């Protein structure tokens, strides 16, 4: 990993921080491809400031583990972020925003709530059954979404007092990072995944934070290609963040 010492966040990365790369394994997103993953040393002390610096190099977290794809023969997974001050809704996103004007948002700390877990179970069973995110126990759910060191919030969205969606976000020093969004499958027409991203952008704007990190854009994977619909978008490629083409098609989608 090439460090850029002029970036103020990068002072949080100790020069002795270790990184490990896995053996090749089946790719979770692209059929018949192998993947390798770079992990930050799990024994190293992690903090919001260190994670914020690593996010500048395209790292994400899963539970308490911080990682980045590191495939020698493939560069399909592109870290993506939205510049908050430049973001503009397109027509379909504006419609999704209007459809959900009745919702109330309530951010809560990442303390386990049975209601959240049951909603997650229903969402995964309806949308991603057998996709690797199925959980049998609350502990598996916590291990996926939370960590002991990150400033994580669960944003509850209610309609008439009923919980319809939860968006999990990490607060970084320079922005908000979308971890995962799950919602009531019967509310699919609301486009709650789209709404959750737009809410994060508005929340980052309210907090005077410049970026919303969306994870990895994978153009060849329909479930991960939707991120290109949030414009303008920046991707981390060739060691730097750069703006995507403004002429790519914009459609509707969700997390």
Image (cartoon, rainbow, N blue to C red):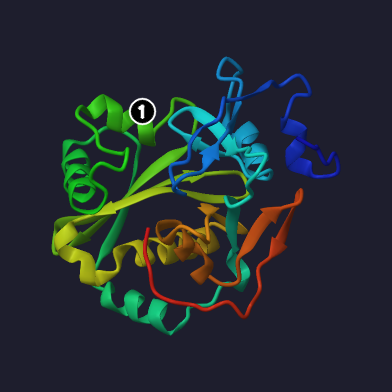
Is residue 206 visible from the viewing direction of this image? yes
What is the tally of numbered marks visible in this picture? 1
Q: Nearer the viewer, residue 152 or 133?
A: 133
Quarter of the image with the C terminus in it: bottom left
Q: Is the residue 190 above or below the residue 59 in the image?
A: below
Dot 1 corresponds to which residue? 143
Location of residue 20 by image quarter: top right
From the viewer's perspective, tell me whether residue 98 is left or right of residue 39: left
- Taking the view exactly as shown, the residue that stands out farthest to the top is 43
Q: Which residue is located at x 18 percent, y 65 percent? A: 187
- Residue found 57% across the figure and 25% down from its top: 22
Q: Measured from the top left, where is residue 90 in percent x and y?
A: 47, 81
Q: Position of residue 177 (x, y in %)?
A: 51, 49
Which residue is found at the position 23% from the left and 45% from the top?
A: 129
Q: Is residue 166 visible?
A: no
Q: Residue furthest front?
A: 32
**In-image side of 68 versus 4 (left or right):** left
Q: Nearer the viewer, residue 46 or 128?
A: 128
Q: Is residue 70 above or below residue 252?
A: above
Dot 1 crowding, Cα within 10 Å, few <14, some 14–19, many 20+: some
Q: Nearer the viewer, residue 201 or 143?
A: 143
Q: Residue at x 79, y 24 (%)?
A: 15
Q: Regarding mark 1 in the picture, which secondary structure is present there?
A: helix
Residue at far right of view: 6
In percent of width and height, residue 106 lies at 30, 53
Point out residue 253 in the picture as x, y percentages from the top left corner. 38, 68
Q: Quadrant of the N terminus?
A: top right
């Amino acid at each position: 990993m090439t460090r850029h010492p002029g970036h103020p966040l990068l002072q949080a990365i100790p020069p002795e921080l270790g990184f490990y790369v896995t053996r090749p394994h089946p790719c979770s997103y692209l059929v018949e491809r192998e993947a390798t993953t770079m992990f930050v040393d799990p024994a190293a002390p992690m903090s919001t400031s260190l994670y914020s610096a690593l996010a500048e190099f395209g790292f994400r977290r899963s539970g308490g583990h911080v990682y980045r794809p590191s495939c020698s023969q493939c560069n399909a997974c592109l870290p993506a972020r939205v510049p908050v001050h430049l973001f503009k809704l397109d027509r379909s996103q504006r419609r999704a925003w209007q459809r959900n004007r009745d919702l109330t948002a309530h951010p809560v700390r990442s303390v386990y709530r049975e209601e959240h877990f049951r909603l997650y179970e229903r969402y995964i069973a309806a949308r991603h059954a057998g996709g690797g995110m199925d959980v049998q126990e609350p502990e598996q759910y916590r291990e996926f979404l939370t960590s002991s060191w990150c400033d994580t919030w669960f944003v509850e969205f209610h309609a008439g007092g009923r919980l319809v969606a939860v968006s999990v976000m990490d607060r970084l020093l320079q922005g908000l990072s979308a971890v995962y969004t799950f919602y009531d499958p019967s509310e699919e027409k609301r486009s709650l995944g789209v709404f959750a991203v737009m809410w994060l952008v508005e929340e980052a704007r309210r907090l005077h934070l410049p970026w919303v990190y969306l994870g990895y854009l994978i153009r060849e994977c329909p479930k991960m290609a939707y991120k290109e619909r949030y414009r303008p978008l920046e991707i981390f490629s060739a060691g730097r963040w750069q703006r995507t083409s403004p002429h790519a098609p914009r459609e509707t989608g969700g997390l």
